[in-house]
Image (spheres, rainbow, N blue to C red):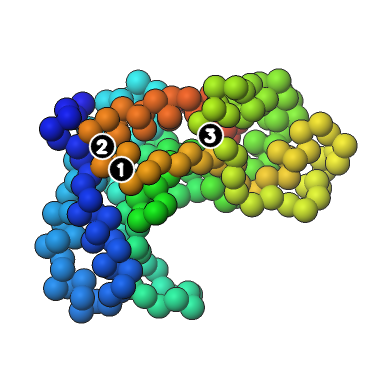
Amino acid sequence: MPTKATPHFGKDLFRFLRDLKRHNTREWFAAERARYESAVREPFLRFIGDFAAPLATISEHFVADPRSFFRIHRDTRFAKDKTPYKTHAAAQFRHEVGRDVHAPGFYLHLEPGNVFAGVGLWQPESEPLRKIRDAIVEDPAAWKRAAHGKAFRASWELDGETLSRAPRGYDPEHPLCEDLKRKDFVAMTAFSEEEACGATFLAELTKAFRAASPLMAFLTRAVGLPY
């Protein structure tokens, strides 16, 4: 656990990302590579290493290791925006059997003016999506406790894309129809840059993730994985 003398992230991380947004070219990044390593990548990897033990107290089935850190390079093959680099730094702490970003996970996003944490499943495939919806129908009380409980709502807000009408096979008059229409089962909570640069940020993030643990437990078990 960090002390007041050793916060993981500094203002130089956000300064680098602001500069990258203004100079998003391979030439600029190559010249500034050492700065990226010292200001962004190395601090984030230290944070991930230190977060492994607190994460295990929330669920032993989620992993914090160097693979949690997202690479800075953008996949531009099918994108109109051909800038080569992401202008944020992020990590996803996935379930131990998760293969990609669509698996259940805890997420941290550091971007100038946009620091947030996320939990849940983003754009799950049709089968896990069906399983989550079925779990809500089968145990609506458990879902309401997990996703709409007072402790959860104090920090977190459900987010993501939704359908315009009830999905096929589900009652459009169901009292939880708005949740059944969700295409993403994710929730977000915001932080400031100052909080991210503070020495207690790891503890604050752990506390926030712990408050979201009932939602994560519901979703993880709904798709047939241990929590």
Residue kind at label 1, given as amino acid type: Glu
Could you tell which of marks 1 and 3 lies nearer the N-terminus? 3
Q: Nearer the viewer, residue 133 or 184?
A: 184
**Residues at marks 1 and 2, CA–CA distance in whole angstroms:** 6 Å
Count of picture labels:
3
**Residues at marks 2 and 3, CA–CA distance in whole angstroms:** 21 Å
Circle number at residue 198: 2
**Residues at marks 1 and 3, CA–CA distance in whole angstroms:** 19 Å
Does dot 1 land on a helix, a strand or a loop?
Answer: helix
Mark yes or no: residue 221 visible. no
- Residue corresponding to mark 1: 194
Between label 1 and label 3, give the one nearer the viewer.
Answer: 1
> In screen coordinates, is 46 left or right of 109?
left
Q: Give how far across and how far down residue 34 sits, in percent.
A: 12, 62
The residue under the point 51% across, 31% down is 155
The image quarter containing residue 59 is top left
Mark yes or no: residue 190 visible. yes
The extreme right residue here reads 173
Could you tell which of marks 2 and 3 lies nearer the N-terminus? 3
The quarter of the picture where the N terminus appears is: top left
Residue kind at label 2, given as amino acid type: Gly
The residue under the point 35% across, 21% down is 57
Does dot 3 land on a helix, a strand or a loop?
Answer: loop
Residue kind at label 3, given as amino acid type: Trp
- Residue corresponding to mark 3: 156
Does dot 2 land on a helix, a strand or a loop?
Answer: loop
